[in-house]
Amino acid sequence: MTNKSVNGVPPFKTCAGPLQELGEALRGYFGAHRDGNVPTGLYNRVIQEVEGHLLRQTMEFTENNQVRAARILGISRNTLRKKIAKLDKEHQKLLR
């Protein structure tokens, strides 16, 4: 992680709470698998879970304004729409 702001976004360590909890959860996950028998696919599982929350909360914050949400996330509106479309049916209601 970096200690510098990127495009006006403060470093994650100043955004305590959920990101610290994620770090603790990952430490606990690996601590529970010290025997070396770690399931594969962890990266995709974590990214999918975090991305779902990130998209959901950003859409809620912007009152479902995709242009504004995309700008906040630093992605194009088309990319945002594709990411929302990839999420499961529970997340599909974000497009409405």
Image (cartoon, rainbow, N blue to C red):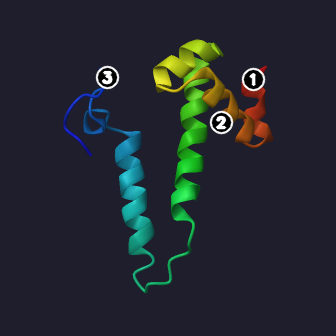
In the rendered structure, the answer to whether residue 36 lies left or right of residue 48 reads left
Look at the picture and state if 30 lies above or below 1: below
For marks 1 and 2, give the CA distance.
Answer: 11 Å
Q: What's under tag 2, amino acid-wise?
A: Lys
Q: Quadrant of the C terminus?
A: top right
Of the two numbered discs 3 and 2 on the same chain, state the one appearing first in sequence: 3
In the rendered structure, the answer to whether residue 4 lies left or right of residue 44 reads left
Q: What's under tag 3, amino acid-wise?
A: Asn
Mark 1 lies on a secondary structure that is helix
Q: Position of residue 93 (x, y in %)?
A: 77, 28
Name the disc covering residue 7, or none: 3
Q: Position of residue 25 (x, y in %)?
A: 42, 58
Name the disc covering residue 83, or none: 2
- Who is closer to the viewer here, 6 or 38? 6
Q: What's under tag 1, amino acid-wise?
A: Leu
For marks 3 and 1, give the CA distance.
Answer: 27 Å
